[in-house]
Amino acid sequence: MKSNRAPWVASVGLAIVVAVLFSGGGQPARVGAAAKESYEGLETFTNILSIIQKNYVDDVQTKQLIEGAINGMLASLDPHSAYLTPDLYKELQVDTKGSFGGLGIEITNRNGLLTVVSPIEDTPAYRAGVKSGDQIMKINGEFTKDMTLVDAVKKMRGPKDSKVTLSLKRENTPELFDV
């Protein structure tokens, strides 16, 4: 004799799942609320973009506005997050064929100041005496306060054997010194 129990169990199981989903319990409802909030934010962004495009006193480049919004969004996270346009990303890629050289330092942005995380052993920066914690105050005479990491890297890169002068501030050292 065949049992009719399997279809009954499946029906009850399906009913429980549907009840949980429609009652607001479970993860899918929370995910749905977060997605709804994100889409509402995107709708607001799109509306503002449209108003600017139609009513701003000067002509605007949509791509430039969107990239500005992305940069603003990432800047609100932390000083280490940055958006790289495809062109800038290609430009910042390290060339492994040896046509570009680097100083050999890892840097970060601490409170608006470019700071050396660490010099890489057996590189120009290491040999010049750059130390972890040194603050890069100038690159080739240009002040770096509030300079982005992307801009700093661009200014420090160049053809192999090219010269780059860093003006550094070191803890417990009153004056800047150049390397």
Image (tube, rainbow, N blue to C red):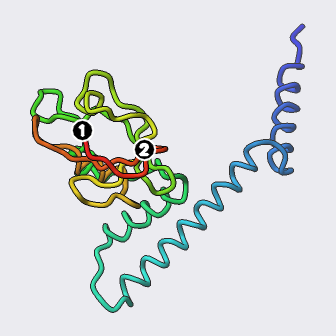
Residue 143 picture quarter: bottom left
Percent position (x, y) of residue 81? 46, 49
Quarter location, residue 26 = top right
The residue to which callout 1 is attached is 93
Q: Position of residue 62 (x, y in %)?
A: 32, 72
- Residue 166: percent from the left, percent from the top? 27, 47
**Kind of residue sitting beneath label 2:** Arg
Of residue 43 and residue 168, the one placed in the foreground of this image is: 168
Cα gap from disc 2 to disc 1, whole angstroms: 29 Å
159 vs 55, left or right, is left
Of pointers 2 and 1, the one earlier in the residue sequence: 1
Circle 2: element type: loop
For numbered disc 1, what is the local secondary structure? loop
Residue extending farthest front: 174
- Please name the residue that numbered disc 2 is placed on: 170
Asked whether 129 or 78 is in front, the reply is: 129
Residue at position x 88%, y 26% from top? 8
Numbered badge on residue 64: none
Question: In the image, is residue 106 above or below residue 64?
Answer: above
Quarter of the image containing the N terminus? top right
* Residue displayed at 69% across by 48% down: 31
Q: x, y (%) of residue 22?
A: 82, 50
Q: Is residue 150 above or below residue 120?
A: below
**Left or right side of 1 for 169:** left
Which residue is pictured at 46% across the width and 64% down the height?
72
Three-letter amino acid code at the position of disc 1: Gln
Q: Quadrant of the C terminus?
A: top left
Q: Is residue 49 left or right of residue 36?
A: left
For this view, does 170 lie left or right of residue 97?
A: right
- Foreground: disc 2 or disc 1: 2
Crowding at mark 1 (Cα within 10 Å: few <14, some 14-19, many 20+): few
